[in-house]
């Protein structure tokens, strides 16, 4: 028999192999541009040049007519070109952040944290920062739909109400399915709906469920709740697989609290000690002082062991089971006990039994009331896995008549989504209110799109008695309607106005014993964005059967084969915002991969399967009873041997152009344990498939050994020493006296600048930076940075002005390669935000042939795009590699439409910052220290005829940083925060405005100090709270 | 005829002061009379009231002379200014009468004006009232100073050119004399025929045209002129000096800003606040055109367009005249509010233009030229205090040019 070969083709032209196709097959552009015409002569070049010039001259004669269209009735508060800020709330399922929305000419263009909030305290995350672009997602629904057809709201209401009353008449079952709902007013609306249709049940589920924890707390304290945590009060933190800095419960709060315990200076030489036991290298693990690799099946045993160790000290009964010989566990137990009353143990598992034991440990340690606040329960995760599973079974068996999906997408993001999707045909009325169609919307009868959260009124109660308002920052772009209004209309309220509902609710609920009239009270709440009422402290008593929990653990976990951890990453998260290119192109904090979905494998396992190339291969991962999935392999130092990690949030099929088809959906792999969703799976088959692949990673360095001039760190025990000095102080020798070494900064070809007005500088504390990446997204949004897509990133052409370098390290001998390789199994991690250092002796400035990059009288290294001719000499000469070249025109270019949505669609362009130029092809760009913010801050001061105050000008990265790692300010002002932090003073007292400054903070250093470029960015060296290694 | 007047500051204050002291009116005793209050009142009056009111002349609203004696009380005036419709609604006799007399035109509510600001406005009105209708004073050309510098250097060049031409002519004459003297000298010598032929060779036009020197000069001149034309053409790309497009409504700045002296800021509300001076929204036009429905030049047709835009809620699509490229950041507040620059400095004599045209080049060279020449307006601005002090110690000069505090740096306008 003849061998049959599959032939693939891209289009009809290729199949027909027409002469036209052959001609263009190898060309980059359909119409060859000048750079393609290598065969042309010099004459042709001159002709084209002449023609081009005259064309330009002719074109210039006809200046385009530009219109200036003012308002008919100008709103009082809106002045063109002046930004307005509105306090609001980011609500995405159970995720919450109190925010301030910056709008220009009525368009939200930036999101910042709200300092007035006692919950998030001005912090943000990458997802919150990126959500402003989701507002302008081209995949948004343009109005209500019945199936594939457009429908008017009136008709939709009529049809829905008819079906509802029909169902109610025959006693049919109605369900409202949603993620956790934080809004008390929305809940009130749902209650109203339930009152009208009593067969209605409201089912909440979460993509990243904490149902096990809810149940454990119910068993321990008699109330199903999740308490608030206060990491800032903890001296010893033990986390068993809880990525509390990345994704666990409320990372925005926790990072802020955690950073407080990690900051050290001469007066506060104490910091918390953090133990992490985990399989995947998470952000929390990367920041931990001691990190132990464990298999997920060991989580329970470790918690049992820890319980027993503590119980022995507390004189309580131990329980059976436990894991012996877990590195650092006994030490952790000792320290926890020594620090009881200021200790904290957390576990990421969704297993009730594990969480009961953790509660028991925390109870013995006296954490309740100090580091854990049960009187202040949070509402972030209220999902009931059991109820959701029952619901899906009911749908499958046809017991449900009507389903409303309120802003959720369970067909995609629930493990039983496939079954639900198939079962929906048994339901007579199914409707989704999501603002996008999504996987669930594709299968329902009606789409009744809600507003995006930035267009809508809403409220939230993220924590008990901590209320928050959301107000629209833009008129709804499309004819969407608040889902709450829809529910009210369907429950028979004819003139539903959700704004009035929220306002009236607040009047009834909160307007009590006020001195203000209601309008003023309401205005104040709206201005602040939050209303925080006191909560009475109350003690809880732990009362749970720990022995039963221990035996449940012993029977539920068996180590066998490869074990898979299904985790949420810090970029795409649970996948609800997957269609946001800002998140897809944000390098994962740990792997530094973008636009890719992969399975992380430990270096040892990679070696065992004889595979250790930089270009990776696909692997097939099979979970018993599930469809095998194929993903590329990423070798991840720090991954526990025998474990695999795969992120949630990929494999979307109906999210939009950006996310569709990226990676695989692993929600179906999530299993069940003890009645709740289990994000770890054992006995997984892992096989390499021969196809090779390259993952787009922005950083591929594996180690920083010997790079003292870039990263400096020390141990807390050394730092506590009174005479502590940084280890590395570079010195250079001069030709005249080679023996005598001097400070590199003291030698210069230049006279040095003098900054009489401001001298802008930045300090970055490596001890506070946790590497989350919120600053990167904030910078991209603020500065109209182009997204370039996977292929361009592979060619190292990403445009990010600010990157977070992630370095692995170990104490291994740099000469001993074997040792280094072993150390790479569980390395220490350092994160270093790297951006233009605004050198005072900038190497880029001296090589630019057209003076497109120059120095300002305030210490800024300025980049003038319109002057740049693209020689790229500057980038070549930059020691920090922070300059970015526009290899393409990324705006208005259909080639980049699916990756750079903010510059290629009419809708997306609304997010651009009008104060920052959109760069074109062929020019260099880089961090400007947010010069537009500096100029605007100065102008405000000038207009008010006063001095510029410290803190008035903050960069976008600083504003987004929830840990406060970045401090920007005027180092000429001795009262500024940065001057005080660095203890900076002029090198020459007689000439205080000269560029040379001395920092007296012993931790302050500059990267690559020895080359003498005198940056305006100082780093504060990292301090680890580890014992010195015994030699 | 509408008279124009612009009293000189000196005359104004003396008259105001004398009259203020001699005034014995009952209400007006509370009205401040110090020059500071009067001048503060003048600017408030210009910015807020002048669009509809004059002191001695009825416009959209009544002439304000003596209003403090005419109105029921000073408090009544304050209440009416802050919210006239409330006073009318309260059934106040005087207010209702006034409302009906002026064809039921609602006065804009100035709720943002504070009591003492209203008193300052009254102080100005009183000073003007006491002074009586002034003689028309022809407004002096304030903005010509800007072009004087350039004119001076041009004149200088002309003098040099004329001088050089005179010197050259003199040289030709002297050379002519020399040639004839030499000829005469040679004629007295014994010369051969050949030599005589050379001395007396006729100068023909043809030989001049064919001489290499002449060809060189002509080629050089043509090439230079051609080069200059090309350069000039290239430099003029995108420069729209003189651009005066037809606007959808034949709005005349000459009538509004010139004849009626409406303060620029009354309509261009953003100019003190932000980057954009803003084109007025229709509701600002309607403040007056609610009432004024017949134009001086165009009659009803043009004003009807505003009324239509207002009633149909459709914005007017004006054609932008002053276009800066997107890569240049320009902020009106920095220049007008902080710098104290007159609108006319960049926009030309706007109050004389029926159709607005782009007066200046708006090129980067033009911006930089001004930044080199202009002193920073540091007076009374604490932001600059430290800089002024440092500058004074370093250079012994009290003033500093924009250039000297970084006004030529790229990132001041390009980011």
Image: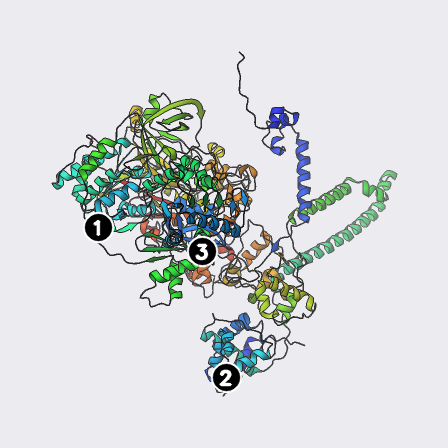
x%, y% of residue A228? 28, 49
Instruction: Tell me: residue A98, above or below residue A442.
Output: below
| Structural distance between the alpha carbons of marks 1 and 3 | 46 Å
The color scheme shown is rainbow
The residue at the far top in this view is: A1
Relative height, residue A310 to residue B29 (above, below): above
- Structural crowding at the residue carrying mark 2, measured as other residues with C-alpha within 10 Å and reported as few (<14), some (14–19) or many (≥20): some
Q: Indicate which disc, 1 or 3, sits on the residue closer to the N terminus.
A: 1
Tell me the distance, in whole angstroms, between the alpha carbons under discs 2 and 3.
56 Å
Could you say where residue A163 lies in the image, as x and y percent from the top left? 47, 48
Q: Estimate the spatial distance between the alpha carbons at disc 1 and disc 2, rounded to whole Å.
A: 68 Å
Label 2 or label 3, whichever lies nearer to me, is 3
Residue A339 visible in the picture:
no
Q: Which mark is residue A369?
A: 1
Q: Which callout, 1 or 3, points to the residue nearer the camera?
A: 3
Residue located beneath label 3 in the image: A492
- Horizontal relation, residue B107 to residue A128: left or right: right
SS at mark 3 in the image:
loop
- Marks 1/3 in contact by CB < 8 Å: the verdict is no
Could you tell me which secondary element the residue under label 1 belongs to?
loop
Q: Is residue B22 left or right of residue A244?
A: right
Determine crowd level at label 1: few under 14, some 14-19, many 20+ residues with C-alpha closer than 10 A.
some
Q: Quadrant of residue B49?
A: bottom right
| Disc number placed over residue B72 in the picture, else none | 2
Relative to A188, A581 lies left or right: right
């Amino acid at each position: 028999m003849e061998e049959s070969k599959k032939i693939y083709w891209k289009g009809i032209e290729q199949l027909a192999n027409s002469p036209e196709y052959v001609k263009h097959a190898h060309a980059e552009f359909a119409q060859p541009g000048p750079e393609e015409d290598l065969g042309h002569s010099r004459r042709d070049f001159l002709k084209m040049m002449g023609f081009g010039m005259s064309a330009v001259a002719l074109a210039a004669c006809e200046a385009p007519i530009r219109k200036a269209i003012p308002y008919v009735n100008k709103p009082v508060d809106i002045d063109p070109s002046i930004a307005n800020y509105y306090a609001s709330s980011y609500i995405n399922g159970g995720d919450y952040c109190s925010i301030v929305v910056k709008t220009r000419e009525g368009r939200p263009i930036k999101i910042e944290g709200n300092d007035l909030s006692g919950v998030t305290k001005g912090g943000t995350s990458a997802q919150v920062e990126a959500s402003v672009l989701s507002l302008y997602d081209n995949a948004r629904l343009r109005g209500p739909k019945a199936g594939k057809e457009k429908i008017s709201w009136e008709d939709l209401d009529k049809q829905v109400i008819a079906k509802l009353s029909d169902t109610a008449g025959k006693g049919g079952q109605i369900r409202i399915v949603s993620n956790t709902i934080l809004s008390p007013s929305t809940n009130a609306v749902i209650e109203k709906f339930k009152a009208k249709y009593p067969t209605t049940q409201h089912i909440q589920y979460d993509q990243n469920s904490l149902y096990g924890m809810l149940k454990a707390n119910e068993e321990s304290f008699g109330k199903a709740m999740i308490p608030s945590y206060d990491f800032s009060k903890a001296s010893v933190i033990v986390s068993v697989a809880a990525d509390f800095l990345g994704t666990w419960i409320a990372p925005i709060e926790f990072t802020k609290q955690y950073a407080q315990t990690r900051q050290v200076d001469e007066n506060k030489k104490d910091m918390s000690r953090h133990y992490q036991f985990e399989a995947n290298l998470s952000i929390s693990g990367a920041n931990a002082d001691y990190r132990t690799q464990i298999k997920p099946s060991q989580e329970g045993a470790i918690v049992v062991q820890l319980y027993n160790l503590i119980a022995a000290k507390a004189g309580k009964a131990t329980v059976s089971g436990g894991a012996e010989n877990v590195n650092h566990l006994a030490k952790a137990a000792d320290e926890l006990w020594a620090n009881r009353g200021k200790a904290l143990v957390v576990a990421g598992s969704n297993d009730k039994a594990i969480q009961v034991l953790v509660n028991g440990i925390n109870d013995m340690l006296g954490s309740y009331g100090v580091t854990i606040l049960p009187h202040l329960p949070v509402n972030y995760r209220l999902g009931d896995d059991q109820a959701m599973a029952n619901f899906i079974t009911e749908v499958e068996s046809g017991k449900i008549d009507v389903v409303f999906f309120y802003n959720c997408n369970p067909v995609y993001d629930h493990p039983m989504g496939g079954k639900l999707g198939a079962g929906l045909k048994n339901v007579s009325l199914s409707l989704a209110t999501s603002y996008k169609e999504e996987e669930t919307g594709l299968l329902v009868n009606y789409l009744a799109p809600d507003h995006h959260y930035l267009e809508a009124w809403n409220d939230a109660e993220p924590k008990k008695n901590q209320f928050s308002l959301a107000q629209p920052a833009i008129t709804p772009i499309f004819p969407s309607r608040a889902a709450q209004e829809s529910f009210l209309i369907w429950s028979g309220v004819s003139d539903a106005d959700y704004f009035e509902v929220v306002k009236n609710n607040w009047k009834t609920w909160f307007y009590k014993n006020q001195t203000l009239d209601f309008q003023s009270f309401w205005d104040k709440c709206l201005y602040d964005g939050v209303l925080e009422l006191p909560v009475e402290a109350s003690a809880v008593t732990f009362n749970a059967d720990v022995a039963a929990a221990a035996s449940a653990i012993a029977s539920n976990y068996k180590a066998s084969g490869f074990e898979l951890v299904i985790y949420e990453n810090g970029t795409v998260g649970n996948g609800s915002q997957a269609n946001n290119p800002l998140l897809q192109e944000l390098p994962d904090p740990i792997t530094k991969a973008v636009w890719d979905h992969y399975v992380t494998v430990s270096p040892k396992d990679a070696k065992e399967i004889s595979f250790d190339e930089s270009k990776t291969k696909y692997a097939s991962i099979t979970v018993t009873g599930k469809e095998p999935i194929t993903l590329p392999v990423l070798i991840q130092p720090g991954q526990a041997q025998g474990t695999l990690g795969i992120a949630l949030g990929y494999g979307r099929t109906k999210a939009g152009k950006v996310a569709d088809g990226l990676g695989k959906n692993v929600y179906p792999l999530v299993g069940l344990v003890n009645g709740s969703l289990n994000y770890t799976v054992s006995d997984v088959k892992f096989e390499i498939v021969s196809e090779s692949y390259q993952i787009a990673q922005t950083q591929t360095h594996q180690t920083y050994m010997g790079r003292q001039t870039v990263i400096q760190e020390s141990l807390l025990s050394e730092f506590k020493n009174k005479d502590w000095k940084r280890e590395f102080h570079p010195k250079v020798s001069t030709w005249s006296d080679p023996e005598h070494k001097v400070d590199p900064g003291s030698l210069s070809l230049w006279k040095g600048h003098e900054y009489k007005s401001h001298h802008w500088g930045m300090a970055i504390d490596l001890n506070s930076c946790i590497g989350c990446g919120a600053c990167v997204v904030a910078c991209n949004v603020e500065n109209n940075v182009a997204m370039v897509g996977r292929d361009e990133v592979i060619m190292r052409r990403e445009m990010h002005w600010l990157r977070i370098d992630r370095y692995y390290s170990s104490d291994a001998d740099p000469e001993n390669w074997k040792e280094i390789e072993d150390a790479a199994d569980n390395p220490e991690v350092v994160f270093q935000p790297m951006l233009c250092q605004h050198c005072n002796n900038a190497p880029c400035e001296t090589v630019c042939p057209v003076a497109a990059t120059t120095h300002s009288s305030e210490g800024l290294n300025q980049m003038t795009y319109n002057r740049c001719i693209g020689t790229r000499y500057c980038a070549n000469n930059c020691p920090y590699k922070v300059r970015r070249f526009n290899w393409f025109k990324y705006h208005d270019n259909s080639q980049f439409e699916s990756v750079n949505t903010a510059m290629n669609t009419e809708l997306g362009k609304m997010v651009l910052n009008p104060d920052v130029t959109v760069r074109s092809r062929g020019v260099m760009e880089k961090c400007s220290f947010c010069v537009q913010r500096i100029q605007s801050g100065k102008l405000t001061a000038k207009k008010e005829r006063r001095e510029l105050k410290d803190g008035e000008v903050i960069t976008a990265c600083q504003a987004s940083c929830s840990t406060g790692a970045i401090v920007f300010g005027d180092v000429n002002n001795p009262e500024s925060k940065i001057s005080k932090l660095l203890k900076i003073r002029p090198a020459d007292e007689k000439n205080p405005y000269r560029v040379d400054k001395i920092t007296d903070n012993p931790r302050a250093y500059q990267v690559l100090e020895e080359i003498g470029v005198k940056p305006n960015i100082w780093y504060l060296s990292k301090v680890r709270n580890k014992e010195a290694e015994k030699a | 005829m509408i008279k124009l007047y612009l009293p000189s500051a000196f005359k104004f204050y003396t008259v105001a002061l004398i009259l203020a002291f001699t005034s014995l009116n009952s209400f007006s005793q509370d009205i401040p009379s110090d020059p500071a209050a009067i001048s503060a009142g003048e600017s408030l009056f210009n910015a807020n009231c002048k669009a509809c009111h004059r002191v001695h002349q009825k416009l959209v609203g009544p002439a304000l002379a003596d209003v403090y004696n005419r109105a029921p009380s000073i408090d009544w005036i304050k209440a009416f200014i802050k919210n006239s419709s409330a006073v009318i609604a309260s059934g106040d006799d005087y207010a209702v009468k006034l409302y009906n007399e002026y064809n039921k035109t609602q006065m804009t509510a100035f709720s943002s004006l504070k009591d003492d600001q209203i008193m300052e406005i009254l102080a100005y009105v009183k000073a003007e009232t006491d002074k009586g209708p002034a003689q028309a004073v022809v407004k002096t050309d304030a903005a010509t100073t800007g072009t004087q510098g350039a004119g001076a250097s041009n004149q200088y060049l002309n003098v040099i050119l004329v001088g050089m031409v005179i010197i050259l002519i003199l040289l030709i004459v002297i050379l002519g004399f020399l040639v004839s003297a030499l000829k005469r000298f040679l004629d007295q010598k014994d010369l051969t025929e050949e030599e005589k032929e050379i001395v007396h060779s006729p100068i023909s036009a043809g030989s001049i045209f064919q001489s290499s020197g002449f060809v060189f000069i002509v080629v050089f001149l043509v090439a230079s002129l051609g080069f200059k034309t090309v350069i000039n053409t290239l430099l003029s790309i995108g420069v729209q000096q003189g651009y005066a497009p037809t606007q959808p409504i034949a709005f005349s700045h000459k009538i509004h800003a010139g004849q009626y002296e409406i303060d620029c800021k009354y309509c261009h509300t953003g100019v003190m606040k932000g980057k954009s001076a803003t084109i007025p929204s229709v509701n600002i036009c309607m403040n007056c055109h609610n009432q004024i429905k017949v134009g001086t030049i165009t009659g009803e047709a043009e004003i009807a367009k505003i009324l239509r835009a207002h009633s149909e809620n459709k914005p007017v699509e004006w054609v932008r005249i002053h276009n800066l490229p997107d890569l240049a950041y320009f902020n009106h507040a920095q220049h007008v509010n902080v710098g104290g620059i007159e609108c006319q400095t960049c926009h030309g004599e706007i109050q004389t233009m029926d159709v607005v045209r782009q007066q200046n080049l708006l090129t980067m060279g033009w911006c930089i030229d001004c930044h080199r020449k202009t002193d920073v307006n540091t007076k009374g601005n604490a932001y600059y205090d430290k800089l002024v002090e440092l500058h004074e110690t370093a250079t012994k000069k009290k003033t500093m040019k924009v250039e000297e505090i970084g006004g030529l740096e790229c990132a001041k306008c390009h980011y």
